[in-house]
Image (spheres, rainbow, N blue to C red):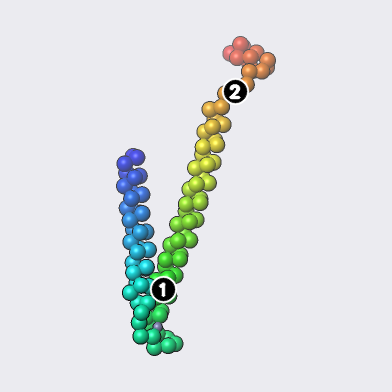
Amino acid sequence: MKGVRRTVAVIFALIVFFAMLSSAVTVIAHGDHQCTGAGCRECRVIWAAAQNARALGVVLTAVFLALTALRVRMVRRLRNAFAPVPRTPVRSKVLLLD
Ligand SMILES: [Zn+2]
């Protein structure tokens, strides 16, 4: 199960990496073009690639923050679940009655 999760995570990371890389390469490759002014096709391609890279960055940041918050919450719950129960007179009596 852990191996499957790791494989899925690696595949997802590779897909995101290549998507961002292709956007960056597109911006670099089309950056030095003969611009025709308003309505230039190359400029539209550059703009779309830059938007894709920005959107991926925002989504990745949001996913990272959400996973971090979820992990912190789970750690707190586990810590509270395994915390030692204080011995009070009432609790000792309940334990003796059981
Ligand atoms: Zn242009």
The residue at 55%/36% (across/down) is 76
Quadrant that contains the N terminus: top left
Quadrant that contains the C terminus: top right
Q: In this view, does 90 lie to the left or right of 25?
A: right
Q: Is residue 15 left or right of residue 96?
A: left
Residue at the spot of label 1: 48
Image quarter for ligand 1: bottom left
SS label for mark 1? helix
**What is the number of the mark on residue 85?**
2
Q: In this view, does 34 lie above or below 70?
A: below
SS label for mark 2? loop
Identify residue type, mark 1.
Ala
Identify the mark nearer the N-term, 1 or 2.
Answer: 1
The residue at 34%/45% (across/down) is 6
**What is the number of the mark on residue 39?**
none
Give the image location of residue 53, x and y in percent.
42, 66
Specify the farthest residue to the right. Answer: 89
Give the image location of residue 65, x and y in percent.
51, 51
* Badge 1 density bin: few <14, some 14–19, many ≥20, Cα 10 Å: some
